[in-house]
Each structure stands twice: as C-alpha cells, then as structure tokens.
Image: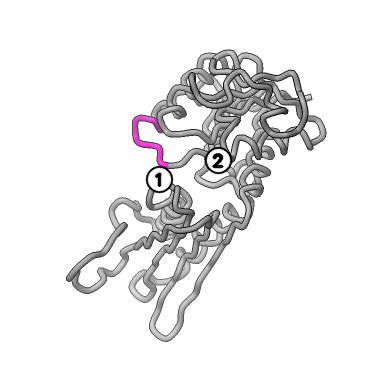
C-alpha cells in the first residue's frame, strides 16, 4: 500500500487529489496539511470533503507529513514549494510538484532536493498536455523558422495568478528545443502599441483570463497560405489529479533525481 500525503489538502486541487486517492486501489491517504491558521486545520479530512470520518486530521506541520508518507503531492504556491522541497531533500521522501510560477530560487531548491530524493516536477500533469509537449517539439523541429511563426495562446479562469501559465511556458520551451534555441532569447510575452513587424524566429504568447476555464492551450504554427494549430482543452481538474497520482505511483522507490512527466509516461 503506497502512502500519499497531500499539501494544501483543503484547496480545490487538494480535495480532488484526496478523493482520487480514496477511490484508487493500492493507495492510502497518509495525511494532509494546510498552512497554520488556515481554514480546515484540525478537522477530519473525510468530513471536510463530505466523505465521512477518516480519522485523518488536517495538519499544519509539513515535516510530519513527509515523514509519514511514501510520496507527497504538492499543488500549493511557489513559496510553499521551496519549504516543502527542502523537507523532501532532508527526509528522502518522493515528491511530486504540480505548482507553476516558480522563480529561479525556488527551482534551485527543487534541484537541490533531487540530489537526495526522487522529485517529479511538471508544469502540467495532464497526460494529453504532455503528449502535446512532445508533438510541439517535433513539429517545431521540422518547420523552417523563417517560414513559420509560432504563437502560443492560453486561457484560464479569472483566479489564476501567474501569466503566462506554466503550461504555456512549457509549450514554449518545447518549441524552442525543437528549433535548437533558448526560449528566453526569442520569447515575446506581450505586445502593446506600435511594436513593429514580427521578428523571424520569435515565439509569442497571448494570455486570456476569465470565468471558470480550467485550461485551454493552443500552439499556432503560422506560415504563408497555411496554418497548423495544436490544441489541448481541459474541462476538469480531475485530469491533473489523475496525472499526479500516476506520477506519485511511479516516483516511489526511484533513485534520487529530477524527473518530469516525460519520464513518468515513457515519452
């Protein structure tokens, strides 16, 4: 039985992850945490989700959660990820991270944790999106940058705080890899005013926010007389939870290292 801990267990993704664990074979809920003073701390997780009493209480001590778990799944916030990653490194507990918007310092903490623990980090846990990453890289490698422009369009719900989304940036990195360039040398994250003609080789981003959109992403390869569009639309956060659970099962027992969903899916 694999024991899975959930940070941010009272949030939208946390609740979905807990439900997926409770409904899955071979998995047990090791526990869940929220930040000290947050709503839900001290309550029974099952009662919080309307699933009946589980005798597992929402805690506020992440170290205790890591020590009680075989693997911990984290969809919280960048600052929290830095704290949790350091604990994963100390305890050697497998760690699955779906949080986006990480800064360079937080990425460094993840990399350091991966020296002593298996860490799976992906901007999107959806199986479909990770197939899209692979397709985008292949298409970008085959289309002449002088003949085809790349634009990435994404839309999310009104509450999303980071822009462009982590998935959009992941798609940009995939396109840049296909072209053999560094994304930060060719990206254009916003256009406003008289910006002049589009430079050849640029990878552009357009960000939309509104309503309750879970996540829509389209990569446009625009040439003269033709346009190729690769699109993924998520209608439920359940796809992210299911992908994270798959990553958690995969990560337990792995050697320390920094992995992605490409490793989990064998792409």
- Would you place residue 42 above or below residue 22 in this image? above
Q: Nearer the viewer, residue 119 or 168?
A: 168
For disc 2, the marked residue is: 260
Q: Residues within 10 Å of mark 1 (few under 14, many from 20)?
A: few
Location of residue 38 in the rendering, given as x and y in whole percent from the top left corner: 50, 25
Q: Is residue 103 magenta?
A: yes
- Would you place residue 105 above or below residue 260 in this image? above
Dot 1: element:
loop
Looking at marks 2 and 1 on the same chain, the residue that comes earlier in the sequence is marked by 1
Q: Which residues are magenta?
A: 101-107
- Would you place residue 161 above or below residue 59 in this image? below
Q: Nearer the viewer, mark 2 or mark 1?
A: 1
Q: Left or right: 161 with respect to 213?
A: left
Q: Nearer the viewer, residue 214 or 68?
A: 214
For disc 1, the marked residue is: 161
Residue at 64% over, 36% down:
15
């Amino acid at each position: 039985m694999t024991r899975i801990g959930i940070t941010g267990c009272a949030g939208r993704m946390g609740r979905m992850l807990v439900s997926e664990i409770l409904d899955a074979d071979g998995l047990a809920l090791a526990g869940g945490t929220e930040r000290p003073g947050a709503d839900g701390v001290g309550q029974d997780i099952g009662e919080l989700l309307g699933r009946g009493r589980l005798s597992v209480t929402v805690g506020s001590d992440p170290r205790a959660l890591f020590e009680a778990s075989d693997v911990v799944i984290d969809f919280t916030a960048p600052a929290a990820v830095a704290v949790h990653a350091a604990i994963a490194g100390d305890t050697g507990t497998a760690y699955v991270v779906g949080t986006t918007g990480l800064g360079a310092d937080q990425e460094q903490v993840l990399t350091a944790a991966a020296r002593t623990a298996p860490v799976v980090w992906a901007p999107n846990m959806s199986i479909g999106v990770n197939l899209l990453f692979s397709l985008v890289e292949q298409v970008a490698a085959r289309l002449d940058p002088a003949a085809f422009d790349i634009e990435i369009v994404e839309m999310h719900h009104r509450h999303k705080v980071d822009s462009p989304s982590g998935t959009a940036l992941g798609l940009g990195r995939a396109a840049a890899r296909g072209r053999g360039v560094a994304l930060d040398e060719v990206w254009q994250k916003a256009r406003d005013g008289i910006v002049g003609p589009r430079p050849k080789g640029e990878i552009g981003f357009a960000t939309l926010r509104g309503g309750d959109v879970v996540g829509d992403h389209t990569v446009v390869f625009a040439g003269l007389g033709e346009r190729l569009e690769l699109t993924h639309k998520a209608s439920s956060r359940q796809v992210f939870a299911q992908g994270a659970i798959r990553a958690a099962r995969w990560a337990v027992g792995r050697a320390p290292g920094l992995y992605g969903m490409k490793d989990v899916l064998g792409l």
